[in-house]
Image (cartoon, grey):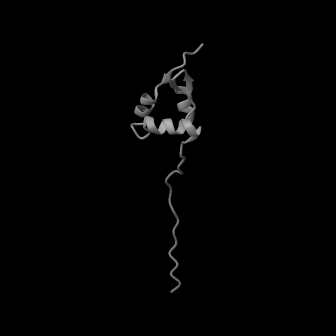
Amino acid sequence: MAENRFLTPEEVSERYRGTVSPGTLRNWRSMRIGPCFVKIGKAVLYPVAELDSWDEKNKVSCRPLGRIDVRAEDGA
């Protein structure tokens, strides 16, 4: 069986380079938004697999660069 890895809210904040603070994670938990978490007693843990899944759900796809056909029609 694969070993599950978990991160604390502070470690999750580090994973996202401080752009998501532990306070934001706390607010999201209270509103039931954001990444899934596990609560054991007072301990709050985020499964790494769930964070990876959350990242995929929030991925923004961009179209590849290509030639943009812009035709200037000034009507003159």
Q: Residue at x 53, y 49 (%)?
A: 62
Residue 60 in percent (x, y) is at: 53, 46
| Figure label count | 0
Quarter where residue 2 is shown: top right
Give the residue furthest to the front: 42
54 sits left or right of 24 in the view: right
Q: Residue at x 42, y 34 (%)?
A: 13
Examine the rendering and report whether any part of residue 33 can be seen: no
Residue sitting at 51 percent across and 68 percent down? 70
Q: Residue at x 40, y 32 (%)?
A: 14
Q: Nearer the viewer, residue 63 or 66?
A: 63
- Residue 61 location in percent, x, y? 54, 47
In the rendered image, the vertical position of residue 75 relative to residue 18, given as above or below: below
Determine whether 53 is above or below 41 in the image. below
Q: Position of residue 64 (x, y in %)?
A: 52, 51
Q: Is residue 33 left or right of residue 25?
A: right
- Front residue of 62 and 56: 56
The answer to whether residue 1 is seen in the rendering is yes
Image quarter where the N terminus lies is top right
Find residue 8 and report its horizontal and vertical position in percent: 46, 26
Of 45 and 68, nearer the camera is 45
**As drawn, which residue projects farthest toward the top?**
1
